[in-house]
Every structure is written in structure tokens, then in C-alpha cells.
Image: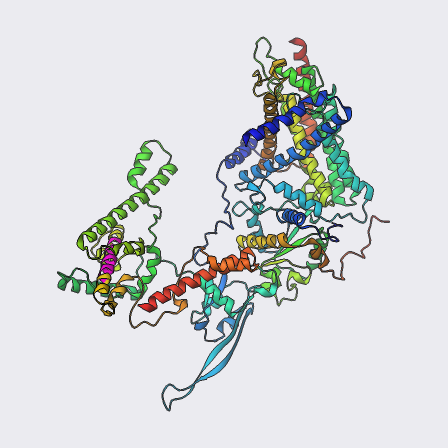
Amino acid sequence: MMDLVFSTAITFVGQATSITTFDSYALSVVVKIAFALGLFFVVPLIGGYLEHKVMGRMQARRGPVEAGPFGTLQLVADGIKFIQKEDVIPRAADKWVFAAAPGVALVPGMLIFLVLPIGPGVFALDLELGLFYALAISSVSVLGIMMGGWASANKFALLGGLRAGGQLIAYELPLILAAIAVAVQAGTLSLVGIVEAQATFTLPGTTINVWYLFPQFLGFAIFFLAAMAELSRPPFDMPIADSELVFGYMTEYTGIKFAMYLLTEYGGMIVMSALMVVLYLGGWQLLPGVPLPGCEGTGGLFDCDPMGTLLGVVITIGKIMALVFLMVWARVAYPRLREDQLQRFAWLALIPLALLNLALVGVAKVVF
Amino acid sequence: MGVMDQVELPKPIRYVFNWGRKYSLWCFNFGLACCAIEFIAASTSRHDFIRHGVIPFAHGPRQADLLVVSGTLTDKMAPSVKRLYEEMPEPKYVISFGSCANCGGPYWDSYSVTKGVDQVIPVDVYVPGCPPRPEALLDGIIALQGMIQNESLKERIAGRRLDPITLGADAPLALEN
Amino acid sequence: MATTSPPGVGLAKGLAVTIKHLFRYPSTQMYPKQRPDLPPRTRGVIALMDENCTVCMLCARECPDWCIYIDSHKETVPPAKEGGRARTRNVLDRFAIDFSLCMYCGICVEVCPFDALWWSPEFEYAEFQIDDLLHEKERLREWMDTVPPPPMLEEGAVPPAEAADAIAKKEKELEAEAAKQAEVTAPPAEAAAAPAEAKPRTADVKVEGAGEIDQETYDRLIAEGKSERIARSKAKSAWVRKQKEKLAAEQEAATAEERGGDEAAAAKPKAAEVHVEAGEIDQETYDQLIAEGKSERMARAKAKAAYVRKQRAKLAADAEAGAEDGGSEAGGGAPEASTPAEPADADEPKPKPADVHVEGAGEIDQETYDQLIAEGKSERIARSKAKAAWVRKQKQKLIDEGGDA
């Protein structure tokens, strides 16, 4: 049994490693798209299940139990249910915009998966401007949210959409400023390049290899908070504040369209966590300065055999899930902020701190 | 929807679809009186109906699959329940929770009390009690889940009650002009 | 707003509380698998013992919801003696409670002068049709199977007057018997425990530690630096283990003694071993030891051993009698001794189903269950009906046993 699993896994990983060097252009495009879509539809489900269970246990509950073994199929059941639901479009709604909005929110989430490296050589594209691409395209999602809020012809949805827009503008700034500090330190915008730079970064004057989490802890904290706010995760979920705005911009959405918004949120969680893993937590490295088994290249991170590749993927997913866990933990522990507190926090605390962080990193880069 | 109420699906697909509906009952609590407290107790850690896939995250009727009417329904409130039910997308289920919701309960001879939710909207499961235990709600949910697993969506949609009174149908829409 | 702690401490506290709960065992009761531990007087559903109902209509009149429906007619009973007056009595035709209307106040149960209405803790009767919530006489009678016995008296409480009388009488008898009974090996001892003593029996059969701990083990574990909680739980299990060992030893001793006593019934005791239930105690020995001032625990253990011994002796005697003459009626007294807990007085009428109490801990009658499932009934309905069937069968069995004696 185990042999079978292993050989299947190795076949898959072998395919994945050869993605970048595939001869036939069309086939390689198909494989890349399948890779990105597969990641997009599977990993958020794992994250959602983790959220259900962790939230349950933190509230002294069990979480889902009955659907599938240990409730693992709860989100699958949700998905099957959503495709059966009636598709309600309010009479006063702007029908085309209403229908297009969830797609506009969902597609950017999928596209980011193209550049995310989740293992040695396991990525669809290694763009020179990978970080720029990821941050730029993640901002498009909010357009879909605002479209949905406007087109619903519902005052709660409209307020929710506007809050989402305001929140995005406020938190995109610290997010990008924190990410720029990483790019400055690494000297590249390529996500794979940033992982490589972390594998070779040593503390000045020593040979101790550390991840960027250590020199840029402030930047990491800013990025984490800003990412949570941008995804409107509790405690920053003012756009869907259920006690004030029913369900915010999602108020009028039913069935599969609603499911697309939900998937956007959970996919966004995975994307932001994966970005944090790449920017601050050393990508697929197990520990700083420890080469992966069977890998060569910079810091023992590239040109891996299948086992090393598989291990790299597992490590990345593990780190992503650890960050998702942190987000769920914050969700359980804290109540929702007020709208004015949210804006005040972004403009008066996070942005000055992010600027300070960038200045410090720039100075350090020049001095050392 | 759209296709599923016209075509009888083949059995394996129907099984999977019914299974999905069975374990994903996003629940909207229409709490009207003391029974609502027992409903809330059923959602807390001791009873935790998320175990059964009854997820109380549906903040609005559009996302809800299951409406639990718990408490005394007055004639004044009845149109709201009716409207809420109509705002829910098909397939939708209703549990009437407690004596008051079942048929007026202790207030059945009051001038202002509706004699049961089923006067206004179709009810799938009646849970008796005054108020019922949280476990009684779980029992009602399990009964409903058994019903969902064996039902045919086509028959359900075809047999659904269509009352002539549809609230808000003639109401002017402010945004249309 | 004055805050006493520096900023951020509250945030950390919040995280600490939630993470602590992550590693605790969740307090969820897995309901359909795990039954809720209901208080004994739970108001789940109202059961009707229709033999007791005299159609006095008190319940229907007192019901605040008017949810009880009663129909009856009058019958003329012919005079008991020649020339006497014919009497009339009410016959119950219909008794229905509308549980969709009922507010579970319990006034009907309290007001019933003949104990025809009872509270049952069952709550699983949600229905798809509202008409099915109107429970007719037959359905209400079925709930009677689930009514629990009255709760135990508190420890150290004064026993009910009739029970106290019975115990005193018993003690006097024992004293008298002890005087004349010097060489009798197997005392007849069937004077039958007082009816009131049938009640404690239900609690007595289970030898479960109600939180007692083995002090020795506890002290040792505490001394080893174990936490209070762990020490307590281990000591509790140690207590149960010791208790069991002791009982087993005593029973073994009893068996050995009995085996050495007679070889004639050497083949029979095998059968006896199958039938002797570990939980039964010999009421007589128990009372005697208690009267002597022995501890409850000791008395129980000894009484149990005595019970086993007596059972063996009786069976051996039966076997002997059966070997000598087949149709002997002389052994009639002996079987009564075998059921000291059953009130087997000669003057008491044959018990009705309602008088016998059977406590089902969720057992179901497999036969009924399979049949209902085969008929296409839902799992839930089959389970509940099979449960009721089990209780009914158990009762019938108890009655049959009592009737034979």
C-alpha cells in the first residue's frame, strides 16, 4: 500500500518538477493551469477544515464530526449543497454586474497561485516581478467585492462594499511597504529569488543563517495584520459585520455565487499565508541553514530528487497551515473592531511603522 | 436549481446531492421567545450541532437552508416570517421548535397569537416541548436529515405549497424609478 | 476609562485563554451516540397508566392549555351478591394529550388522585406531521414503559414507616429463629422481604464506586508527586479493583466450601454457576449483619457470598429431590428463597405489567428492530420501537417468573 502511494506521489512530483522545462508549449500551459487550479480548490478546503476544527476545539466544541470521517468532508458537503441552491437575483439588481462580481473576485485569487513556489521547482511560473504581480493582482479581488456590493441594490450590501473598498486602501499601503522592505533586503522581486536569498542570508559578522522573520519581525507583524485586514478576516471583518450589515456585500448572494465569494476568502487566506511563508519564513526550508535531503544548489534548496521535492512541498503546506492557524486563533480570541478604530489603526499605526521598517532596512542594507 | 426541479436525477447522483444537502444545513434562527434560548444552547459547546453540519453562520436568509422558528409567533410578526421564508432560496427546510411555534402553545386562545407557524409557511419537522431540550432539537434535525437523504428534489419542488398571498409582490421598488 | 494593566496584556490574555481550551477535552456530548444524563424527574413526556384512570376529569379540567381529551361511558356492574344493588363505573374510551399544545407544567400529573399520569424523561418524538403529536391512549401507555422508579432516599434518611416496620419485624423473626436454629444447615428463610425493600434493590445490584477512593493508593501517588486529579482517578480505580478482588475471593471461598460439602450434586453446580448473578445479595444475611452494626460494604459483600452459597445449596437439593422422586411438590418453598428481592408473598396478586419496573439502558429488541428495518421503517423509528419492545418483553419475563412461584 505504502509503495503504491509513494510511487504515485513520485510520479506526480516528477511531473511538477518538469513543468518549467516541458517541451510542448500547449501541454505545459495545460499542466500549469491544472496545477494552479488544483492548488486553488484543494488547499483552501484543508484550511477551511482546519478552521472549523480549531475554532471548535478553542470553544470547547468538537466541530464537524458526522460528514465524512471526523467531519473532513464538511466543506465538500457545503460545496455540493451550494451548487443545488436556487439562484436568486433581486429584481432591482444590475443583473450583469451582479452575476460577474463573484467571478471578478475569484479569478485573481486563482491567478496568484501561478507564481507561488510551494517546493523546490514546484511552481508554474518564476516571474522576474513575481512579488509585484502577486500584490498587484490580489488588489483586484476587492473590485469584485465592490461590484457585488453596488449591484445588489441593497443598502447593507452597498455599505459592506464601500467598507471593503476603504479597508483595502487603508491596508494595501502597509502591506506593500512591508513587502518592499523584503524586496530591498533580498535584492530581487522574484519569489523564488527571495527564498534563495533567505537561504544565503547570514547575520552580519557571523555565519548563522536566519530567515527574514528575524531581522524583519516588525515587517512580518505588519504584513500579517494587514493581510488579515485585507481578507476581512475577523477581527477585521467590518465589511461583512453580521450584527451591523447582515452579511455585507454578500447579503443578496445565494448558492454558487455565494460559494465563490467564500472560496475567495479562504483562497485569499492561503495566498497571503503562502506569501508570508515565502517572504519571511524561508519558503520550503525545514530549518535555517539545514539543507533538504537530496537537494543541492544554493543552501541545499534546489535540484532535488523526488523525495526532497515532496518534503519541500509538505514543509511549505505545513507552514501555510501554521499561519492559517494563527489567523483562526486571532478570530476566536478577539471581538470585531469598530470601523473608525480600523481606519485609525491603519493610518496612524501601521503605515508609520511600515515606513520606519523600510527606512531601517534600507539603512541596514547600505551599512552591512 | 432550474434543472433539478425538472429532471429526475439518476440514483447515484441523487445520493451524493442529497448527502451534500443533508450535512450542510446552514441555519437561520428565527428566535421569538424562550425556545430561542434552547436553540442557542443547542449551538453551544455542550450540544454543538455543527457536528451534524448545521452551521449557524447564515447571517441572512439568502444563505440559509434551514429556518428554525422558535417561540411564540404573533399575528404582527407572521408576515415577517413569511417574507423571510420567501427570501430563502430553494431547497429550504423549516423546523417548528416548541409548543408555541407548533400551534400556539399556552397562548393558543390569545387574540394576537398565530396558531402555529404552519399557518404561514410549510413546516417539515415539529419538535415538541415547552421549551424542548436542546437534544430534542438535535433529534428533530436528525429526523430531518433522514428525510433529506431519502427525498427526491424534483418531487419536493413540485409538491411545494404555493400560496396566492405573496408578500411584497406589489410593493413599489424605490430603486426602479 | 482607566486601565490598570499596560496595553497589550489584554490581547495576550485573550490568546492564552483560547489556546488553553484548544488542548482541553471538549465538553461536547455526542448526543445520538451518547445519551444525555437526564435528571430523574425530567419532564419529557407524560405517560398514562390507563388501568388507574377513573375518568374523574380532574386533569382535563386543570390543564391550563386544555390539551387533554377524555371520552368515557358508564357501565353497569351487576350486583356482587344476590339482591344487592347494581353499581355503575366509568370506562375510559379515549385519553389523548396533544403534545403540540402541552406546556409541560405537570399540573395534570400532580392533580391525578390515582397515579394514572406519570412523567417520563423521553424527549425524542419529533414528528413530520403535526397530527402525530396528538398521542392517543395506546401511545401514552407505551410511554409508561420508560417511567423511571422513584428516586432513592438520601443517605441516612429515616426510612418510610412501612419499610421500618418490616425491618423491625424481620429482625425479631431472625432473633427467634436464631434461638431454635442450631443444627439446621439450610434455613428455609423465605419470609419474603418487605415490599418496600424492593426499591433499594435497583441501586444495590450495581456495585459501582460512587467516588470512593483507595486512600492508600492516593497517599502513595500524592507522595510520588502526582497531581491531585491523577491520584484521585487512579485511587478510584484501585478501590474498584480491590473491591472486586475481595468479592471474588469470598465467592471462591464459598464455592470451595460448597464443593467440599456434597459430591452428590457435583454435576449440577455447573448449571448453578451460570444462573447465579454476581449482583444479587441475600437480604436476610444483609439485614442481620447491618443489625449487628457491620459496615454497609462488609454486609453487602458477605450477603452476596451468602446468596451464592444458598443458591448452590438449593440447586443441589433440587437435583437430589429430582433424582429421588420426579413429581415432588415439597420443594415449593425453595424457589421463593431464590428471589429474595421479589416481593413473593402468597397473598399478593399476580403483578400487572405496570407494577413491574424494568430499566432499559438503551437495549433494543434485535428481532423487532430487524423486522421494522426490513419493513422499510426509518432507523430512528425502528430503534425507538425496538426499545419499547425490549422493555415489554423484559416485563413479561419478570411476570412469568413471578407467576410460576
**Foreground residue among C158 and A328:** A328
**Quadrant location of the N terminus of chain C?**
top right
Residue C193: give x, y in percent of width and height: 27, 64
Q: Which span of residues is magenta-colored? A: C303-317
User: Is residue C104 rendered to the left or right of residue C355?
Assistant: right
Queried whether the magenta region covers residue C315, the answer comes back as yes
Location of residue A236 by image quarter: top right
> What is the total number of numbered labels drawn onto the structure image?
0
**Foreground residue among B157 and A253:** B157
**Foreground residue among A14 and C16:** A14
Queried whether the magenta region covers residue A230, the answer comes back as no
Instruction: Reply above or below: B16 against C48.
Output: above
Q: Residue furthest bottom?
A: C83
**Quadrant location of the C terminus of chain C?**
bottom left
Q: Is residue A192 visible?
A: yes
Residue C392: give x, y in percent of width and height: 44, 63
Q: Is residue C381 visible?
A: no
Determine the main secondary structure of the stretch shown in magenta. helix
